[in-house]
Image (spheres, rainbow, N blue to C red):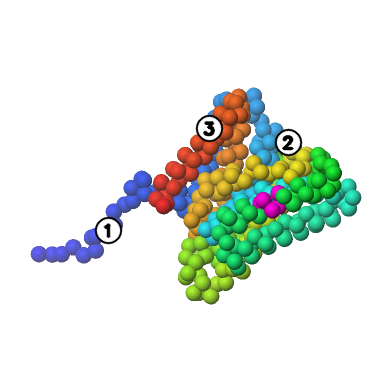
Amino acid sequence: MSETVGTDRAPAPGAVTVMRRQLRDRPVIPLLGLAAALVVAFAIASPKSMGPEWVGIQLRAAIPLAILAGCQTLAMLTGGIDLSVGAVASIVGFLVATLEPNIGTPAALLFAFSAAVLAGLITGIGVGVFRVHPLIMTLAMSLVVFGTANYLQNVLVKIQTGVPDLVRSIGSDTLYAVLPYSLVVFVPVAAVIIFGLRRSGYGRLLFAIGDNPIAARLSGARAWQVLVVLYVISALLAAVAGVLISGLTNVASVNLADNYVLPSVAAAVIGGTSIMGGRGGYGGTIVGALILTLLGSLLGTLGLPEATRQVVFGSIVVAVAAVYARVTAES
């Protein structure tokens, strides 16, 4: 009687397993499909609005959100979160607009970005050195920054409603009504984040700390240093977003970017970044920010009341995030 050798083979993965792997390892592909579906829905709801200018409007709105969502992506990879990005972005936009008439745009930008670095440094020390939970530390820092901004506004005795011409041009102007000038800022930022996460030692440390902090520490990684640098980088990204938001809206106020905080978290989660740490990437986050922008635009086009739009928007975000967590079997 002969024996068959080597006939045992692993069963072919089913469709559900393949979809889970695809969504876990390459979330950009299904997310792009969702974004395309939203574009089709918008075309059906308002076909006359579709055109090059519409594309430019969506991109201009998505870029600041994508940058702030980058802050959340970096923090979430370590198992943290950064709720101070809205306050930091707001105070940077406010400082640039307020100081520019007296000291010029370059000096105003330098001063505002230095303030952002200081806020990020304090946050990083609190999280990395004193081991305060990131949720508590960043929430507290947002209150400190907001209070400081209010104090400065009272001292200056005026509210600056306009922004420097350079900032307004970068934030709101487009090339051929399609390509926003803000892409000049966003493309290098996105390239550095994507390349840094996958190709640099620092990026690998972020994944390692979020995936297994004990093993990372035993391997010689100094987590506190990584976290301090992380929150400084996050504050700088928030500062960039604050400048772009003030240029886009032509308004500088102490609560300019408050409404971006939760959508930035949602964009990172929808983009495939685990809030538990150790898994994710910036490519999916960018598409997640675009999806949220398209969704908000679609709900506005449908003419729904503001309260109804908020309920529908939040429900859809929760549903998409829940589906992602379910499909990838994430606890």
Measured in 3D between alpha carbons, the distance from the residue under mark 2 to the one under mark 3, in whole angstroms, is 30 Å
Image coordinates of residue 149 in percent, x first then y, are 75, 49
Res 204 → quadrant:
bottom right
Q: Does 144 lie within the magenta span? A: yes
> Which residue, as the protein is rendered here, is positioned at the far left?
1
* Residue 175 seen from this side: no
Can residue 15 be found in the magenta stretch?
no
Mark nearer the viewer, 2 or 3:
3
Q: Earlier in the sequence, mark 2 or mark 1?
A: 1
Q: Which mark is residue 9?
A: 1
Q: Magenta segment, which residues?
A: 142-146
Nearest to the eye among marks 3 and 1: give it.
Answer: 3
Circle number at residue 113: none
For label 3, the residue is 312
Mark 1: amino acid: Arg
Type of amino acid under label 3: Val
SS of the residue under disc 1:
loop
Q: In this view, does 155 lie above or below 37?
A: below
Callout 3: helix, strand or loop?
Answer: helix
